[in-house]
Image (tube, rainbow, N blue to C red):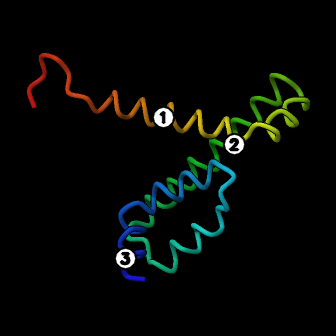
Amino acid sequence: MKRAEEFFNRYGTWAVGIAAFTLIPYKIFTIASGVFMLRNLKVFIAASFLGRGGRFMTEAVLIMLFGEEILSFLSAHFELITILVGAAVILFLAVYSLPRKGSRS
């Protein structure tokens, strides 16, 4: 249990943010945040707001652009879409964190 708590304190904010945006049960991660007393409430709220807000805003924009027909596509392919978006974010963060030529570190 102690290892799980340490793991959640280290990566809990990311877990909450990812669960908020994907089909992973968000309630489980919010409850775990309380059980493990996630250290930074402001970061938890920000991750929840960005994850949930991002998900529902994306769905709303897609419905505005493509109509309600997009809902059946999203339902059928949401896992793949989530994996691709997650991979793109990870790739962006990895490239962004690389040292720049000519910069002093």
How far separated are the C-alphas under marks 1 and 2? 15 Å
- Name which residue lies at 51% across and 71% down: 33
Q: In front of the other: label 3 or label 1?
A: 3
- Locate residue 3, reporting x and y percent: 37, 76
Neighbours of disc 3 within 10 Å: few (<14), some (14-19), many (20+): few
Neighbours of disc 2 within 10 Å: few (<14), some (14-19), many (20+): some
- Name which residue lies at 56% across and 56% down: 48
- Quadrant of the image containing the C terminus: top left
- Locate residue 66, reporting x and y percent: 84, 23
Whether tag 1 and tag 2 are in contact, CB under 8 A, the answer is no
Q: Is residue 30 left or right of residue 46?
A: right
Is 53 or 98 nearer to us in this picture?
A: 98
Q: Is residue 68 left or right of residue 37?
A: right
The earlier-in-sequence mark between 3 and 1 is 3
What residue occupies the far left of the structure in this picture?
104
Neighbours of disc 1 within 10 Å: few (<14), some (14-19), many (20+): few
- Locate residue 7, reporting x and y percent: 38, 68
How far separated are the C-alphas under marks 3 and 1? 27 Å
Q: SS at mark 2? A: helix
* Disc number for residue 3: 3
The earlier-in-sequence mark between 3 and 2 is 3
Where does label 2 land, which residue?
79
How far separated are the C-alphas under marks 3 and 2? 29 Å
- Locate residue 15, reporting x and y percent: 50, 58
- Name which residue lies at 61% across and 54% down: 20
* Disc number for residue 89: 1
The earlier-in-sequence mark between 1 and 2 is 2
Q: Give the amino acid at mark 2.
A: Glu
Image vertical order of residue 50 relative to residue 16, above or below: above
- Quadrant of the image containing the N terminus: bottom left
Image vertical order of residue 53 relative to residue 61, above or below: below
